[in-house]
Image (cartoon, rainbow, N blue to C red):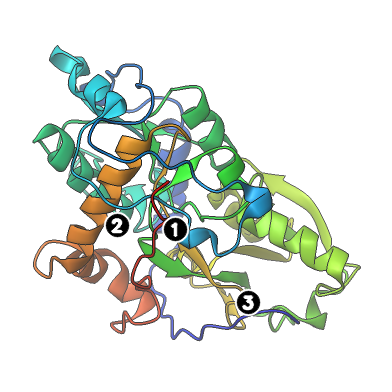
Amino acid sequence: MRARRLRASLRGWGGVGAMAVVCALAVLFALLLPAARSHGGDTGGTGGPGVTRGSQTRAEECADPEEQTLAPSAADGPTIDAIKSRTGEKRKLVVGVDQNSYRWGYRDPNSGGTAELEGFDIDLVHRIAEDILGDPDAVQFKAIPTDQRIPAIQDGRVDMVVRTMTINCDRMKDVAFSAPYFRTGQQLLAPRSSPITGYDGSLAGKKICTAAGSTAYSTLEQDRADGDLVASADLSTTVPNQLDCLVRLQLGEVDAVVTDGALAASQAAQDPTVQLKGDPFTTEYYGVAMKKDADDLVRRVNRILVEFREDTTGGWQRSYDVWLSETLGRDTAKYRPPDPRYLRKS
């Protein structure tokens, strides 16, 4: 098998009751977010003065997609100018996020009635808004299903998507990515009592749930075509949002879920009757996704990410400690992205 394994010691806690509350909130807020953050505008165009233009490599020429991004720059350009030109309540960064990925982008039912979005991805969004608009709360959050992340960017509904989105070659046909901000890998989630042992022959005849448009689904399809996944595995169950797979698993409609290990660990924490099975079988990286021609915004986000990673008091490490250490452990070495590498200027 061509899998690249990354071992992780993952812990879980919590209960099914909390999961039910989170799922209920996910349905309640699936279409609309709080009115306080319900204003936004259109996004701008291309390039940027003071920066050298360089289009991202096309997917058909793609290798090491996590390295196919533009060098950092603090210079504004048409895209950032358009964001800054918004007035009044519309002067906000419009960002597609998840609202039901525990510890990444979710609404805490125990937050005293405010149900504000919080999590690792949400911290990063606030950091970007503070840099571009001078106010960490100058954000309009839009809940975007997994399979709508790319259309939302292309249609101009959002300026960017920060939603545990894996950088890969196919997606680079349609959107531009920042440098990586987190390292993960695909992993299996199944009931504790299940005979499934991992990404192996124990999946024969098993129903596997994935989110439509996800890296998990495309990976499984390719692996089955290549003979790396047992041919009798049933991949027919796909859902709009990844959390829906956990619900299907709890209802006994599927035998296993495949998703990013970082997300799977959070789901195992929500329901102690399920657990991670086997090690991650890929190595992947999350990135911020933007329009392909928004070079100035890509460069600006990359500069923000450099500072986010290096900030030891309020950056990457603090967000990890607050949101992810309980599910992924204190050792961050396996989750920190490598030092970024950028496309040469052209």
Q: Residue 259 appears at what percent x and percent y?
A: 58, 62
Looking at the rendered structure, the secondary structure element under dot 2 is: helix
Q: Name the residue under label 2.
A: 120
The secondary structure type at the circle numbered 3 is loop
Residue closest to the far right: 232
Circle 2 crowding by C-alpha within 10 Å: few under 14, some 14–19, many from 20: many
Circles 3 and 1, Cβ within 8 Å, touching? The answer is no
Relative vertical location of residue 323 with respect to residue 92 in this rendering, above or below:
below
Identify which residue is drawn at 36% across, 55% down: 104
Question: Residue 71, position in %: x, y?
Answer: 32, 53
Q: In which quarter of the image is residue 336?
A: bottom left
Res. 126 image quadrant: top left
> What residue is disc 3 on?
281
Viewer-side label of 2, 3: 3
Name the residue at 33% across, 41% down.
Answer: 52
Q: How far apart are marks 2 and 3 (CA)?
A: 23 Å
Residue hosting label 1: 286
> How many discs appear?
3
In x, y percent, where is residue 175? 51, 39
Distance from the alpha carbon under mark 2 to that under mark 1: 12 Å
Q: Which residue is drawn at 65% across and 59% down?
A: 216
Relative vertical location of residue 278 with respect to residue 250 in this rendering, above or below: below
Quadrant housing the N terminus = bottom right
